[in-house]
Amino acid sequence: MTQPVIIGSERSEVGLPAGMDVLRRGGTALDAVEAAMRRCEDNLTDHYVGTGGLPNAQGVVELDASVMTGSDRRFGAVGALRGFPNPISVARAVMERLPQHCLLVGEGAALFARENGFEGAELLTEESRAMWREQLLTAAEAVEGENTPAVDGDHRYRRAALELVRRMAPHEGPWGTINIVALDAHGEMCVGVSTSGYPFKYPGRVGDSAVPGAGNWCDLRGGGAACTGRGELSLRGGTARTVVDLLALGKEPADACRVALEEAAGLPDEYRSELRALALTPDGRHGGAAGQEGSVYAVMTGASTEPELRPRTLV
Ligand code: GLY
């Protein structure tokens, strides 16, 4: 029997105990990840995931989520899903009930969720709506002040609109995607990722959380890894997959995360901001790395009474 372990990114602490309860009862890593992640998605004080997540530039919450299991590399994901509070469960349903597909987005993802009996809900809370409005007003003022007199009002208008979207996408964190990786008593692993994505993103933008190899990867030959932060960097870097490949070559988890993040950090990127990674191996070793000081991840084993925070290696 393997000793179960569950790890998660910042603010996963609200969910990890539920995941560890599943693992202690002999449940699967997939069940543990889903149980833990649903708690995080339902946490209204967390503005980067599930209900209460920050909306896109038009004020609509669009969620990305994925699950992947380590023994068979099955993968299910949804992107830009509107109106369903627990995208992790919809992602799992894609994996289990629509195995000819891995990823559904937008209207198709919502149709699938409805057809499979998931309950819809309004995801924009009063608080997240107020945060969006404040950002909108600040960005509009900044753009207005910057515009030079334009020869053509139509062009000026369009340029300002694009600039508005650019400015609304923050360069700095805090980034709030949730990563959860579990190892169960049978030796199976699962990685789950859930997010409301880049705050005030362009409508329809799907980030790394829904994309295998970028924000999520799980393969028992190396382990499981996931990313938070600027998803365009891990999409371009194939960062979660890189971490797991490095684990398979024998690197320790924190070191594998550091090397993969360094690789992504070498990419030219005008919107550079923090990227973080964490990893767990099939024999229970774990670690993380981040581009910013003070970043941590949370861990629980069968002996834990509550999640413990561990520092990430600084890149
Ligand atoms: N890492 C989350 C995102 O970029 O959407």
Image: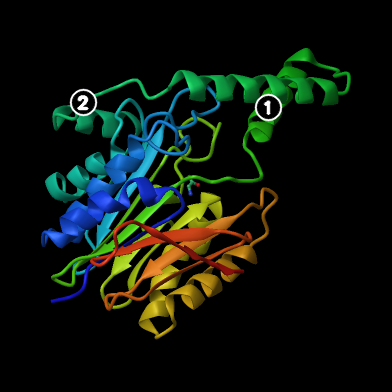
Q: Residue at x 27, y 58 (%)?
A: 68
**Which is more toward the observer, 256 or 2?**
2
Query: Where residue 273 sits in the image (x, y, percent)?
Result: 64, 52
Query: Where residue 134 sits in the image (x, y, percent)?
Result: 63, 21
Task: Tell me the quarter of the picture where residue 204 sits.
Answer: top left
Cα distance in 3D space between marks 2 and 1: 34 Å
- Residue 164 placement, left or right of 303: right
Above or below, 26 against 158 in this view is below
**Whether the residue under disc 1 has CB within 8 Å of ligand 1:** no
Query: Where residue 188 sits in the image (x, y, percent)?
Result: 19, 68
Q: Which residue is mark 1?
A: 164
Query: Where residue 117 sits in the image (x, y, percent)?
Result: 14, 29
Q: Which residue is mark 2?
A: 119
Q: Residue at x 30, y 46 (%)?
A: 37
- Residue 191 placement, left or right of 254: left
Task: Tell me the quarter of the picture where residue 119 sits.
Answer: top left
Could you tell me which secondary element the residue under label 1 belongs to?
helix
Q: Residue at x 57, y 25 (%)?
A: 131
Which quarter of the image is occupied by the N terminus?
A: bottom left
Task: Tell me the quarter of the picture where residue 299 sits.
Answer: bottom left
Give amino acid for label 2. Answer: Glu
Q: Is residue 290 visible?
A: yes
Above or below, 298 against 87 in this view is below
Could you tell me which secondary element the residue under label 2 belongs to?
loop
